[in-house]
Image: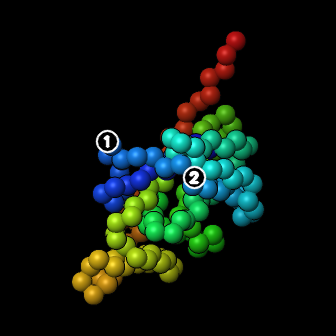
Amino acid sequence: INARKVNDLNGSGNYQNGEPFMAGWEIEVYDIDNQLVATDITDAEGRVSIKVKAGDYTVCEVQQDGWTAVRPTQINATFGQPCYSVSLLPKRIGWMRFFNTQLAVRSSLSVDGDEVRYTWDNGPENETVNIDPFSHNPFEPTVIYLPIIGRK
């Protein structure tokens, strides 16, 4: 599993040239039984590479004070953190990026059944908006699977 942390300066949830990568963030990997199987800290380039066997995993970032998660957009109800779900086939790599901002983009995100609720602390009177989680979401994670090429 390869992950990268981005300081999302404009809070867009998309990488823009010049947005720095972030060191010192803990990334956790949980198995299908919700057991912690691996953890690592992002390096100077905001990268972690965690080796796991083929299977289904939840990959989460540990939040830090003063930062707001922008992508992934949902807080995992089990772990209380922004997480991706990934299914890894043998000899495949799961790629993901975690985006955070220090802008006052939103103060809270909650999930209640099929309803996702975002609350912005910089909106009028702490504006709250319900979002349909099944509609198109520009912040949905993108996972790309690439074959591992062996050397002879």
Q: Is residue 75 left or right of residue 17?
A: right
Whether residue 136 can be seen here: no
Task: Identify whether 139 is placed above or below 80.
Answer: above
Residue 120's tag is none
What is the x, y in percent for residue 130?
Answer: 35, 78
Mark 1: secondary structure? loop
**What's the CA distance linking mark 1 and mark 2?**
21 Å
Colouring chosen for the image of the structure: rainbow
Q: Amino acid at mark 1?
A: Asn
Residue 24's tag is 2
Mark 1 or 2: in front is 2
Q: Amino acid at mark 2?
A: Gly
> What residue is rendered at 29% in x and 77% in y?
122
Whether residue 80 can be seen here: yes
Q: Residues within 10 Å of mark 1 (few under 14, many from 20)?
A: few
Residue 43 in which image quadrant = top right
Task: Identify whether 19 is placed above or below 135.
Answer: above
Task: Identify whether 110 is placed above or below 140.
Answer: below
Q: Is residue 128 left or right of residue 40?
A: left
> What residue is rendered at 45% in x and 65% in y?
67
As drawn, the residue found furthest toward the bottom would be 125
Which numbered disc, 1 or 2, marks the residue that appears first in the sequence?
Answer: 1
Residue 71 in which image quadrant = bottom left
As drawn, the residue found furthest toward the left would be 124
Mark 2: secondary structure? loop
> What residue is rendered at 53% in x and 49% in y?
23
Task: Identify whether 107 is placed above or below 56.
Answer: below
Residue to which mark 1 is pinned: 17
Q: Quadrant of the C terminus?
A: top right
Pick the front one: 89 or 42: 42
What is the x, y in percent for residue 16?
Answer: 32, 46
Q: Residues within 10 Å of mark 2 (few under 14, many from 20)?
A: some
